[in-house]
Structures are given as C-alpha cells and as structure tokens.
C-alpha cells in the first residue's frame, strides 16, 4: 500500500495540498495558504496517485516517493522559478527552508 496524506482542503493553520505537473509527473505538494513574503512555502511529498474520501469526512492522497530518475535539484529549481520556496513543515505548521 502506498503512503497517504490525510488532509482537509485548508487546515486552520492554512496548510493545503496542491498538485503541480512537472515533467509528466503530478507532484504532491503541501503548501501554506497564509504566508508573508514573495514566495509561497511548500514541502514536496512525492508523486500523487489518487485522491480519496474517507467515511470520517477527511480526504487523503495516496502517493509514491519521487522516482530516482527525477532530479530533486531540478524540481526544487523549477518550483522556485514558479514562486515557491521549498522546505519542510513541522507538526505545528512552522516552515523551515531547505538547505
């Protein structure tokens, strides 16, 4: 079974799941709707497979890791060119930029 990410369309912290097409792959991104600054913070989760609803009313995406043939450096650069800053969110919704 693929890993999955449970989400609401937008959480109270302003986190939301987003899909961006890159090089024929649907990238699953965790982004922050509420932000200050010119670039929008995102965390790359992997390759989106399927959006599903659960009986509890939550939604989730099944996803696969990025394939080894897809350069993380290229993906990061492309996202930066499109107004994103890549990093990691902690469990409280705080963002830390990737090194």
Image: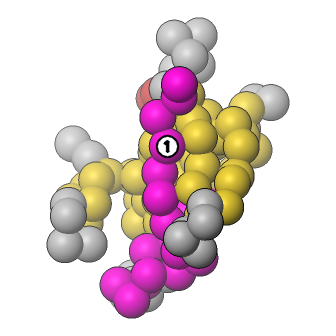
Q: Is residue 44 left or right of residue 99?
A: right
Q: Is residue 89 placed above or below 20 in the rendered structure?
A: below
Q: Is residue 49 left or right of residue 34?
A: right
Q: Is residue 98 placed above or below 6 in the rendered structure?
A: above
Q: Is residue 82 placed above or below 9 in the rendered structure?
A: above
Along the line of sight, the residue nearer the viewer: 2 or 85: 2
Q: Is residue 31 visible?
A: yes
Residue that sits furthest to the right in the current view: 24
- Displayed quadrant of residue 96: bottom left
Q: Residue at x 59, y 10 (%)?
A: 69
* Residue 27 at x, y percent in the picture: 63, 42
Residue bearing the label numbered 1: 4
Q: How many marks?
A: 1
Q: Residue at x 70, y 52 (%)?
A: 51
Q: Residue at x 47, y 51 (%)?
A: 5
* Residue 37 at x, y percent in the picture: 39, 82
* Residue 35 at x, y percent in the picture: 39, 84
Q: Over which residues does the magenta segment extend?
A: 1-18
Residue that sits furthest to the top in the current view: 69
Q: Is residue 6 placed above or below 23 in the rendered structure?
A: below
Q: Residue at x 46, y 34 (%)?
A: 3
């Amino acid at each position: 079974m693929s890993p999955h990410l449970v989400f609401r369309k937008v959480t109270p912290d302003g986190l939301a799941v987003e899909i961006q097409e890159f090089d024929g792959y649907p990238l699953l991104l965790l982004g922050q709707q509420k932000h200050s600054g010119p670039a929008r913070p995102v965390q790359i989760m992997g390759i989106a497979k399927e959006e599903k609803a659960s009986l509890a009313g939550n939604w989730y995406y099944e996803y696969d890791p990025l394939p080894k043939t897809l350069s993380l450096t290229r993906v990061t650069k492309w996202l930066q060119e499109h107004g994103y800053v890549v990093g990691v969110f902690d469990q409280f919704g705080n963002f830390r930029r990737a090194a």
